[in-house]
Amino acid sequence: MSSPVRTIRPDTTIEQAQRILLRYGHSGLCVVEAQRESGRVGETPIPNPQSPIPNPQSPIPNPQSPIPNPQSPVPLVGIISRRDIDLALHHGFSHAPVKGYMTTNLNTITPDTSLPEIESIMVTYDVGRLPVLENGQLVGIVTRTDVLRQLHQGRTEERELKSEYNKTLNTQEAIYRVSTSLSTQLRDRLAPPLWEFLAKASEQAQKRGWHLYLVGGAVRDLLLADPDQTLLLSDIDMVVDGFHRSADVGAGVELAKALQNTYPEARLEVHGQFQTAALLWHLDPVLDSLWVDIATARTEFYPYPAANPEVEASSIRQDLYRRDFTINALAVRLTSPRAGELLDFFGGLRDLRSRQIRVLHANSFIEDPTRIYRAVRFAVRLGFQLEAQTERYIRYALDSGIYERSLIENSKAPALQTRLKAELKYILQAPYWKGALKLLGDLEALKCLHSTLELDHQLWKQVRLLERCLRRFDPEKTLDHWQMRLEVLIAHLAPEYRPKVAKNLQLPDDSIKRLQQLDLDQANVAKSLPTCIRPSEITRVLKQYGLPTLILIAVQSQRPIRRLIWQYLTQYAHIQPLLNGNDLKALGYKPGREFKQMLDHLLAATLDGEIRDRADAESFLAKYYPL
């Protein structure tokens, strides 16, 4: 191992950490709590966040010098990598403390850990450095370079560890033995036409010298599903990668076109910007309704927070790394050799077993706020928990104010506009939407819509009132219920913010107009209704508004107003005059402007109980409109 370890404090800024990496050529730094007495760890003073980094030209301390004050050991609290620092700097967080970006779920070893065990941990968990702890305190670090150097030396003692090393490999084989049967599981548990499609896709990819992988949700659902039941999939993601190099940019599109020749009934969509293609079947007699996305393995880079990513061809490993959560970063190889092999670079299988949602890197939510909503959606839908550090990353991103700044500084921020709307739709129309909304509220994630929006007691009461209204007044679901739920959330904002948020989410024009006029409409109703005594007076005030507007006014109003709106919608709105225009002509009245006045008068009298039947209506006309 290497000792002493160069370390920083949790309150060291991102910029300072980056300069330390640049100065010493490290790819990561251990983060420790400073000793109160000395403020030092290892052989390197921890930079004070308020003071500049020492001049890079100054002498570098001897890395072999002993740790001062060994009687005061150092507690390790995290590790931050160069990638985490680079992304934070790119998004403008140079002055933020590293504690918001460091990894706290650490794989560690002890001074007695064997070389085979170290190799196994590095390969299994995809880590390049392992802190060495003794009695819970940081005493050194082992890097990939250390391991390679030790292997290269070929010492006799390493050969003596061979039997132990084989045991470790056997343990690893046991882990992947689960995965080697995935090909059989897919064949046995998918509908035969779908398995046949995957086989043909694999054959076409292999002809072109590519690997083909089933990735994402389909793999996750396969591993979670009841093994005795057929797995129903309507959405499949596949990734194309090269054997010895990245596949060409257009590989995914080329494969999709080849498959369409075999399945001409499928509709082909090509998205060149993201190097993807999709094959779509709708109510097909064989494949039913199916959406298959085929992409070239790619990496992505976000030019600014909440932007659409810039993509380029890459490897399957990088393709999986760009995904949102470990449980969605799993892949099954469909092509030979090793068809059915599970690729799990980031501990997704472990997180499935522990039923937790874990993000892949610290800046994930800064780059794409829709991942917050996806995390909530998966957690509630699958009955998982947000992993503790993932929740901290969410809260840190929300508290940073980056989303509001991104909207101000950039004309387009799709992750806060079209993509956020899509995630809101997914959540608000799902059977579990109440639980998801409650979790979003607990995380204060509604700040993504507007920095002042929070799910307080009043808003939650309005959401519950909305459900009563929708069940009672729109049982046939003529309205978009998910959109009404979203409008109630937006209506909780101050009136001046509502239209902007609605436009930002690209809601329909009628929805934007409704939210824009809601404050005025609500004021008019609140002023006019209390003076209404007769049902006809209540109807005259409320009939000018559509059902969505009345529902929004009702959920935001006090009980007396709400009760009158409820009466109108349940009773008065369904009452019609007992005579119509044809009846008036039959009675001898000449068509004209007076017809509307007569029919309105008839309706008012009917509402107020003055007219009960047709005879009453004719007598009423004879009295007030004699021929």
Image (spheres, rainbow, N blue to C red):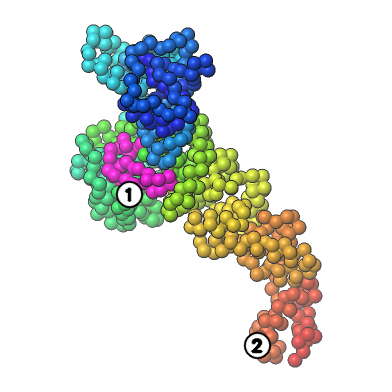
274 to 561, vertically: above or below:
above
Query: Label for residue 274?
Result: 1
Work out which quarter of the rendered image holds the C terminus and state it.
bottom right
Is residue 308 on the magenta stretch?
A: yes
Secondary structure under the numbered disc 1 in the rendered image: helix
Q: Amino acid at mark 1?
A: Phe
How far apart, in angstroms, are the residues tagged by discs 1 and 2? Answer: 62 Å
Q: Are marks 1 and 2 in contact (CB under 8 Å)?
A: no
Displayed quadrant of residue 70: top left
Whether residue 392 sits left or right of residue 2 in the image: it is right
Sooner in the amino-acid sequence: mark 1 or mark 2? 1
Whether residue 268 sits left or right of residue 455 in the image: it is left
Residue 435 image point, x, y percent = 57, 42
- Check disc 1: other Cα within 10 Å, few if <14, some if 14-19, many if 20+: some
Who is closer to the viewer here, 277 or 167?
A: 277
264 to 160, vertically: above or below:
below
| Residue under the image location 71 percent in, 71 percent down | 540
Residue 96 image point, x, y percent = 47, 35
Is residue 436 on the magenta stretch?
A: no
Instruction: Name the residue beneath numbered marker 2.
Output: 592
| Residue under the image location 44 percent in, 22 percent down | 46
| Residue under the image location 48 percent in, 57 percent down | 506
From which residue to which does the magenta span run?
Answer: 294-321
Work out which quarter of the rendered image holds the N terminus and state it.
top left
- Check disc 2: other Cα within 10 Å, few if <14, some if 14-19, many if 20+: few
Who is closer to the viewer here, 408 or 158?
A: 408
